[in-house]
Structure formats: C-alpha cells, structure tokens
Image (tube, helix red, strand yellow):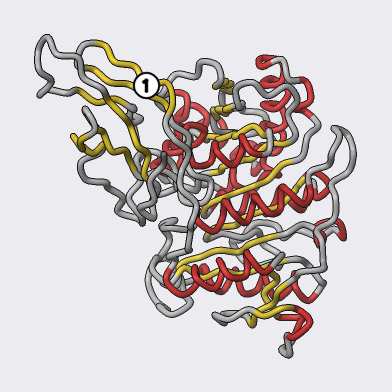
Amino acid sequence: MRYSILLLIIAVTAALAEQSPYEVFPPAEPPYHRVRYVASTIPGELIFAVNFTAWIPPGVTTLRGVIVHQHGCGEGSCKSGLTGAFDLHWQALAKKHDCVLLSPAYEQPDKANCQMWCDPRNGSDAAFRRALADLAAQSKHSELTSVPWALWGHSGGGHWAGGMLFLHPERVVAAWLRSGVPALQAADNKPKPYSIPDAALAVPIMCNLGTKEGVTVKDGRFAGVWLGVESYFTTMRAKGALVSVSVDPLTSHECGNQRYLAIPWLDVCLSARLPEKIGEPLRPMPTDDVWLAPLNGTVAVSAATFTGDRATSVWLPNQALAKAWMQYVNDTAIVDLTPPPAPTNLRVAGNELTWEAEADLESGLAGFIIERDGQPLAKVPEQGKNPFGRPLFQNLQYSDTPSQPLVRMQFTDDMAEAGKVHQYRIIAVNTVGLTSK
C-alpha cells in the first residue's frame, strides 16, 4: 500500500512539473550550452524536470574543472538558476581557471518538497552526472565528464553541494555552503544523515550564513539555520576537516555581498588544488600559511600563534583570505585596489553604442561611464540597483544570479549632433568604484 502511494505521489508531482515547465531564458547559444531532462516517474530517480546551462570560456582548448552555481529551494529560487551561467562575475572566475560555469535549474513546483532534488541521493546526483556527459558531447569537450568540481550552493543548494561532497569527495575541489548544510545526525522529519568519508576531510569547506539566521537574531523563519551550521561545523572540524564559518553581519537568508568573499576563496582553492594534467588527482591544500580564528570570532591569526581550541577553530587557507574574511565578518566591505578590465569591441551604428566587457574578479562589475569627445556623457545604468548588497550591472536575484531579462551593454546617444563625427569611450566601473582604462 505504501509503495502504491509513493508511486502516486511521484507521478502527480512529475505531472505538475510537466504542466508548467520553467521559461528557458535567455537562449543558450555557444559559448553557452543547455540540456533539459523531463521529470521521472521511476522510484529513486529525479521527480522534477531540470535544466543545466553551461558557459565555456571562449578559446579554451582543455577544460580543467566545473564551477557549479546551485540555487536554493522554492519556485522563485529555482527559476533564478536559469541565469546563473550568464553571471559575468562568476564567469571571470571560470575563465581564470579554464573551467565551465554550470548552473542547474530544477523545475520544482510551488510548495513541493525540495528534498526531492536538494538531497542528491534522490536522483539529482545522477542527473548532474548525466548532464556533464551530454554537455561534453554537445560542446565537444570530452574531458567534462572527468574533471573536478568546485561547488557553490545557496540554502537547499548548500544541502546539495554538501551532499555531493560526501558522495564524491575525490571530485570536489572546494564547497561553499551558503545558508544550508547536509544532515549529519538522524532526526524526525529530516533527511537521512550522511556518513563522512575520510577523503571529505581534505576538501576546503566554507559555511556561510547571515547573522539574522539564528546567530544574533534568534527568531524568525530562518533562525534554525545557525543550529544546523554549528552542528555541522563542530562535527567536521573535530575530525580535522578544513572547514570555516563566515557570518554575514548584514543579512538573513538572502545572499547579500557573499560573492566578494566566495569568489576569492574559490580562486585560492582552485589555484591550489586543480591538477596540472587531466586525470591526475586533486592536489592537497597547502598548510604553510594557514590562519585560524575562534568560532564566531572576528579576528584571525596565523596558525603558529593561535592559542585557542584548534578543534573548534575556523580554518582559513592563507593570510590574504584571512584578511578578507576579517573584513567580511565586520561589514562585508572587502578591500580591492585593482581596477577592472577595460571594455573591448566598442561598436557605433548611428547613435547606438554596443560593447563587451569582463567583470573584475575581485569586485565584479557595477556599470560603465560613457564619454563623448573626451567629456563625460552618461552612466550605464544611471542608478545601480541591488536590494541584497552592492549595486551590480546585471542586478542580483535572491539566489545570487542576474535578473531577467539580462541587461545588455548598450547605450543610445539621443543628443548626438546630426552630421557630426563623434568619438566615444567606454570605461568600466567595479563595485568598489574603481575605474578601468
């Protein structure tokens, strides 16, 4: 009887998902690639439809890894995953390391049980690996099926990324878990806990959450997040795991300014761990410049001078990241002294300007200054928006992805003088206000 009821639930959920497929926007044309799988009615397989969109850095000959940007639970967060691969800031990280930027979008109906995808044992692990194989064939990058993964996940995506780490520790470069961690202890109405393989202890992990998720604000919808993170951290760290905690002092469950620590942190991990040749094992994290901090503290010191309890200490890979971490947990205003890359390929057709630009790896892209005949003409956008943190050119959704429709790099000069030849320049501005050449 129970088996029949389970089959009925799976069938109904799958039917609902297929009745209202998520809008696929924007289109995936090279260097973007996309595969979509329909919901399955077979027990143990994924009961939701899912899109996987990948961005492959133009000109790369051999891919070295996959950076996964995984959205959280709920229909809104799931839909936000449709634009994750189009994020210029995350693309800058992927390009630096010759990696694919991959953004899944699970088509979870409203109020459906997201554990049916964010627990990878319920079919999303198999769907993910199937997508890598199909995207490898589509893009003609056969190495995509075997290269390592750097995992970023928000909320339910944090559960998923943490679960994938336990299932495939030999494939995971690092895992950033924002506002969600996998279960390690059995509890009523909770997912089956994971066992902790020894190989997972060598993988750098960052547990990131907002202070209003139970750290300083003890009530509200997300107040229980901290209890889960604290339990996960203390269990893993006691076993010697390379695990950290970074508390965002400004937010609750929204992602806020976490990318300004997440991207540099993943940059350090990718630089240290990606193998020189495809097929070789991941390299161990260096230990000669480790810094430590007390849990929920705000000051980190070198491991050689740390006098606290190492079994409960926050692990940081080097001095530069430790300084960024200290700034982040204070006010999230991480210092950046490097200007963004200059825009390229400026084109003028009549009074229509279009151009291309890459984001600053450290601080992303806030916008552009338009000059005409050597004089400032306009800003694009005129006023940056981001309800969750620093204003970004592509704006920002709740799960750290660009808003739809994607903002284009274009400007119309309505004040251009007819018959006169004008000279234009475009200057990029990053999110700390530094300008490009």
Q: Name the residue at the right extreme.
A: 280
Q: Which residue is drawn at the image coordinates 79% and 49% (left, top)?
A: 273
User: Quarter-wise, where is residue 418 in the image?
Assistant: top left
Q: Secondary structure at mark 1?
A: strand
Q: Which residue is drawn at the image coordinates 54% and 73% (left, top)?
A: 326
- Place of residue 250 in the rendered image (x, y in percent of width and height, measured from the top left): 38, 69
Please tell me how crowded label 1 is: few (under 14), some (14-19), or many (20+) other residues with Cα within 10 Å: some
- Place of residue 298 in the rendered image (x, y in percent of width and height, measured from the top left): 54, 80
- Vertical order, 39 against 247 (above or below): above
User: Quarter-wise, where is residue 159 in the image?
Assistant: bottom right
Question: What residue is disc 1 on?
Answer: 346
Q: In this rendering, would 118 be left or right of 385?
A: right
Q: In this rendering, would 29 be left or right of 236?
A: left
In the rendered image, is residue 396 in sight? no
Q: In this rendering, would 381 be left or right of 219?
A: left
Three-letter amino acid code at disc 1? Leu
In the rendered image, is residue 172 in sight? yes
Q: Which residue is drawn at the image coordinates 53% and 46% (left, top)?
A: 361
The foreground one among 95 and 15 is 95
- Vertical order, 128 against 314 (above or below): above
Q: Name the residue at the bottom extreme.
A: 307
The foreground one among 191 and 314 is 314
- Place of residue 55 in the rendered image (x, y in percent of width and height, measured from the top left): 57, 27
Position of the N terminus, as image quadrant, is top right
Position of the C terminus, as image quadrant, is top left
Q: How many marks?
A: 1
- Place of residue 187 in the rendered image (x, y in percent of width and height, measured from the top left): 65, 67
